[in-house]
Amino acid sequence: MHQYFSIIVQPIRLDEVHWTHRAHLGSLRANTQYQYKIFSMDYEKRTWLYLKNEFFWVGDSKTETLHIGLISDNQAGVRAFMSILHSLVNLPASYPSQYLTRSSAKVFPHYLIHVGDAVQSYDSLEEWQTEFADPLSYAWSSGQGNSPPTILYAHGNHDQDINNRYIYTTGERQGKNWFSTTLGAAHFVVLDSQPLAQAETQLDWLRRETHMEAWVQASFRIAIVHIAPFIEYWDPRAWEELGEKYWGKYVRAKLVPILMDSGVDLIVSGHQHIYSRGWMSNEVGKELIKDEFDISMNNSDKRQRVRVIANSWKQNRVLQGKDNLTYYIDHLRKGAMMTVIGGAGGELDSKQVEDWGFYQKTVLGQHHFAMITLNNEESRLMWRTYDANSQLIDKFDLIR
């Protein structure tokens, strides 16, 4: 039986032919296909169909195995972005069949996380159309005959709206571009790495959020933030002469301590256009966020500290499984995995500017995307990273 309901929406006008519509749908039924229609009304109250689309809603399922795709930094790289999306959409063909569920046939992945910098200029309607919306729509309509999955979006430095309207992504939220949600056994906090005047407001919110039951009771706790707290590859001139080395200080010195103290399991970032992954123990984290590391890691004294930190990491290898890619996390939460996935299309970085000493995997010269699979029966978070040809380039598992 079909059910229908209507919502009155006040559209935001962009130009003569483009509008954005934002509506709160409330509680949706899990594992259900939804169709929505947008009608327009003139001054004489005559209506006509403006748009029709549909989507599949997985919902907050504690038993369903969930697949979550992750991309970042596709700005100004449409061709590479299309290759990434094509591989992402067609990944089920090579994915382990035991992790594909009935809903996977409806939409894959179930959710999509974008870690920022979808466009070069936030106020450019043309860029949002040609570099983001069109590639997404084409990839899923041609590959699966469906709309793109639900997107969780973390704003980057390029897609920051100085007017705080964010009409292309979040609607009018007064510049507060952070939120939380629970997907399966994982609780996510999506943060703003450059909140400007709202910096302290976000910190206060994060302190409260990490004491909420949803965070405390989650099997896995995940943070999404665009600017990586520990960047190693960048343009050397921009890093040193233009002061871009300081862009990550807010994330590193303010957000990371709250997250680590609250037992975060995984921090996912972009901004740096390469792939990096490393386990950071709590002891290592406390060393790396000290004031003395604000400027640079690249002098002899600090490199000596890096060696000390590396030795500390070796002492914590009991957290790993025999395959060296499985990490068992208990209620003590002794550290967090750090990943950087800024390779969905933008020009890739190649010059090393820092050495933080804890990354275990770095992949240069390859555009890439990641996939999280949450297997609730095994209390397992599976992370897989693929290149634009769907070839596996990295993996790890977190087990509770």
Image (spheres, grey):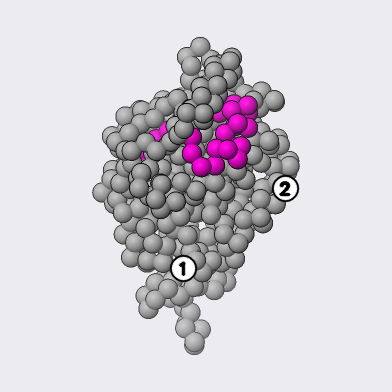
Q: Which residues are magenta?
A: 273-297
Mark closer to the observer (2, 1): 2
Badge 2 marks a residue whose secondary structure is: helix
Residue 211 or residue 375, whichever sits in front: 211
Q: Name the residue at 49% across, 66% down.
A: 162
Could you say where residue 98 lies in the image, as x and y percent from the top left?
Answer: 46, 24
Label 1: which secondary element: strand
Q: Within 10 Å of the Cα at label 2, are there few (<14), some (14-19), or many (20+) other Cα atoms? A: few
Q: Is residue 204 among what the camera can see?
A: yes
Whole-percent x, y for residue 75 in the image? 35, 53
Q: Nearer the viewer, residue 150 or 146?
A: 150
Quarter of the view holding residue 70:
top left
Q: Is residue 299 above or below residue 181?
A: above
Residue 303, how many percent across, how many down?
48, 27
Indicate yes or no whether the magenta region holds residue 150.
Answer: no
204 relative position to 309: left or right:
right
Decide: is 21 above or below 400: below
Q: Quadrant of residue 393?
A: top left
Residue at x-position 60% and y-position 43%: 253
Mark 2 is on which residue type?
Answer: Arg
Residue located beneath label 2 in the image: 208
Residue placed under numbered mark 1 in the picture: 20
Q: Is residue 280 left or right of residue 127?
A: right
Q: Which amino acid type corresponds to the residue marked 1 in the rendered image?
A: Thr
**Whole-percent x, y for residue 20 in the image:** 46, 68
Tell me if residue 279 is in the magenta stretch.
yes
Above or below, 300 against 296 in this view is: above
